Amino acid sequence: MDVLLIAESRPPADVLEGLLRGLDSAGATGVEVLVGGSWVLAAHRVNPINQAQVRAALEPGTNGTTGGRIVEPTTSFLTSADFTSTPTQVAIGQAVFGGRRIPVVAGPCAVETRDTMASIAAAVAGAGATGLRGGAFKPQTLVYNFQGLGRSGLEVLAEVGREAGLFTVTEVMSPEVAGDIERYVDALQVGSRNMQNFDLLKRVGRSSRPVILKRGYFATVEEFLRAGEYVVTHGNPNVILCERGIRTFESQASKFILDLNAIAFLKRRTHLPVVADPSHGSGRRELVTALARAAVAAGADGLMIEVHPEPDASWTGDRAQTIDVQEFGRLVEQVDAVARAVGREVLVR
């Protein structure tokens, strides 16, 4: 039996050491600290016969602790609203996800020239965006497609974001490049294809940067939450879940289907912020604004939008889902109107 031991407060090192000894003598082998800030321990291979002793080791005053509880997780727990009823708020730069105000992240699919990126950053900032997105390393289904500028793209993204007063986010594709990316951007994105790249999830879980975790287009909501659990259990509580569309039997109306049901459900199921990507969620630029409005009405805590001054001339294959800067301005205005109707507002830089 595997259990989680949830303490009411984080004890000093000597108390923690005493508790670990007490748990070991109670038969809870393989105990490891998972989340230091909230002080969550995982005890593996707990003999059911010894469970009473394990519970006793967590009693207030025992081994110097202030008390705690034992949980037998059969599914994701630390990302669940059962773990805490207080919604988690995640700050990236000056923006906060999970509060009353709704941040909007905008930018091209991939980082392009410095002049193009500076133009995009200034335009989206002027229209109300608080974050700048852009891929320096791009996963492509077709090997011949543009796969990003790499480190030079990170430098451009960081520079133009700073100049425009926008926080920056880019995708990390492997544990090996995570360290380089952390030095340049304010937040890490785990893309849809990597939602179950468990080595990557563990690595970003050890990062000091907030993580925007995109739902795999193949994944159930529970699988999505379990991916988030990997990040949180490795020490990073600053996780933002992003609904970016799933694949269904529909192939004519849109490339993917933005799962609005999942947004509303996740707002009840998890304490983590939930954002939406209506660009990938539809694959069609003429649907992006409508889906952005719907996502906010369903409870989304933020939006990620692909924007380019000349969508049909962008460097990647995502041209069909990219809107121009004029449409982005209209999108922000309309989303703000919907947000105010449900007691919120768009966070403007």
Image (cartoon, helix red, strand yellow):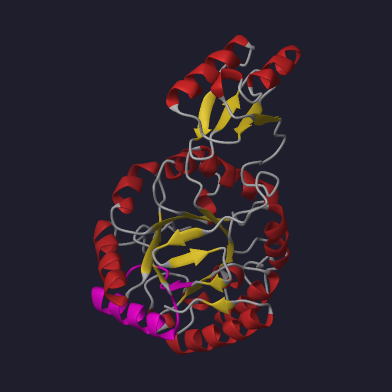
Marker count (numbered): 0
Tell me: residue 178, above or below residue 118: above
The quarter of the rendered structure image containing the N terminus is top right
Residue found 53% across the figure and 34% down from its top: 39
In this rendering, position of residue 316 left or right of residue 53: left
Which quarter of the rendering shows the C terminus? Answer: bottom left
Residue 126 among those drawn in magenta: yes
| Residue found at the very far front of the displayed protein | 61
Residue 286 seen from this side: no
Looking at the image, residue 30 lies above or below residue 303: above
Q: Nearer the viewer, residue 254 or 231?
A: 231
Is 311 included in the stretch rendered in magenta? no
In the figure, 301 relative to 115: above or below? Answer: above
Q: Position of residue 125 (x, y in %)?
A: 39, 80
- Identify the image quadrant of residue 338: bottom right
Q: Residue at horizontal 37%, vertical 84%?
A: 123
Specify whether 184 is left or right of 7: left
Judged left or right of residue 167, residue 97 is right
Residue shown at 66%/61% (left/top)?
247
Q: Splitting the image into 4 quarters, where does residue 314 fall?
A: bottom left
Position in image of residue 186 (x %, y %): 36, 59
209 and 195: which is toward the camera:
209
Residue 42 location (% of width, % of height): 58, 27
Quick one: 137 or 347, which is closer to the camera? Answer: 347
Residue at screen point 48% across, 87% down = 329
Q: Residue furthest top?
A: 25
Q: Position of residue 196 (x, y in %)?
A: 55, 44
Q: Is residue 28 visible?
A: yes
Q: Which residues are drawn in magenta? A: 104-129
